[in-house]
Amino acid sequence: MPATYRAMQITRPGILEMVQRPVPEPGAAEVLIAVEACGICGADASDIEGADPARQPARVPGHEVVGCLVKLGDKVPTRWTLGQRVGIGRLGGHCNECDPCRQGRFALCLNQHFVGATCDGGYAEMMIARHTGLVSIPDALQAEDAAPILCAGLATFNALKRSGAQAGDLVAVLGIGGLGHMALQYARAMGFKVVALGRGQDIAQDALTLGAHVYIDTHQEDAAAALLRLGGAAALITTVADMAAISAALPGLAAGGRLVLLGAGKDPLPVSPGFLVCGERSLMGSLTGSPYDNERALDFSVLTGTRPLIDTLPLEAANEAYQRMRSGKVTFRMVLTMGANREASSSQ
């Protein structure tokens, strides 16, 4: 194993710099991962743009990480072995001690590591992780395909499961981007009648190809009225933080329908209590999920052939990749690849 590894750290807000770091030793209950691929998520923006320039060493972002285990610290369970393919998402490992953990609600752990924000992430050839955050990666998935599933895939997979919709119900997805393109595929595979809500006709064919039965252009149609003509949505999954767009689509919920929010915006969402009470409608937020949830999303992706649509760039092009993600000039998801680690894993 080399003595150093390459990492892209946030030297100042919005700027990533390539550095060489000494390979760290995992502590108790920690592992060292040789990273093969790391997705670039929209949530990385807050980590990169809001970084504290006084922090030393500077933070390494990235929370859609796939690689293999190269070192194990003390007290790591035997289910994790050297050379095993693993991933880690935004939630970097629960403590197993706080009240939510004792209740089995690991995603809500009060002492959770947030990968790329409170601990270093995967824009690097190596990273340390808590074993409680590890996810087993199926052999059938390439590293660059698995990486976005660890965040965008998991978030939408769990949102659909929690929506209350049943096979045959109408489910609408608002926002056909990095998360939405996964939601459409999963929703179709789960047996829902899928409606995509987007702005403009440029995304219409993509939405239909990805699994939507119907595409509604919210620039040309009233989203709520269009949903009601189709019978009303049993669930509305929103992947955007545009409260005006959400409010416009919300009246399209059928009686008993549920709004599931994935976009964590700061603006308030105006909702009439009468609309909720009289139609027994509900709204909820949905986080990502536990490592076990993540493994179910990965397995479902293999079972149904669901894959993210990605563009890839090497680690050293992280600044370019990040800017492409920010500008929207990317297929749907951007993934960084670590050439040497990827080749070494493929040759095993």
Image (cartoon, rainbow, N blue to C red):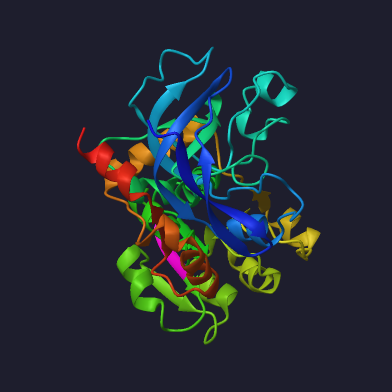
**226 horizontally vs 274: left or right:** left
Image quarter hosting the C terminus: top left
**Would you place residue 201 above or below residue 157 in this image?**
below
Q: Residue at x 58, y 17 (%)?
A: 28
Residue 190 as seen in the image, left or right of residue 174: left
Q: Residue furthest front?
A: 3
Pinpoint residue 25: horizontal percent, then vertical percent.
53, 25
Does residue 319 show up magenta in the picture? no
Q: In this rendering, does residue 21 appear at all?
A: yes
Give the magenta-colored segment's residue range. 192-196
Residue most extreme to the left: 347
Report which quarter residue 192 is drawn in. bottom left
Residue 195 in magenta stretch: yes
Using the rendered view, name the quadrant where residue 210 is placed: bottom left
Q: Position of residue 34 (x, y in %)?
A: 40, 36
Q: In the figure, 275 relative to 323: above or below?
A: above
Q: Nearer the viewer, residue 138 or 12?
A: 12
Nearer to me, 249 or 121: 121
Which quadrant would the N terminus be assigned to in this image? top left
Q: 150 or 239: nearer the eye?
A: 150
Q: How many marks?
A: 0
Residue closer to the observer: 5 or 103: 5
Residue at 58% in and 21% down: 27
The answer to whether residue 262 shows anywhere in this view is no
> Which residue sits furthest bottom?
220
Q: Main secondary structure of the magenta part?
A: strand
How far from the left and from the top, in percent, is residue 323? 52, 70
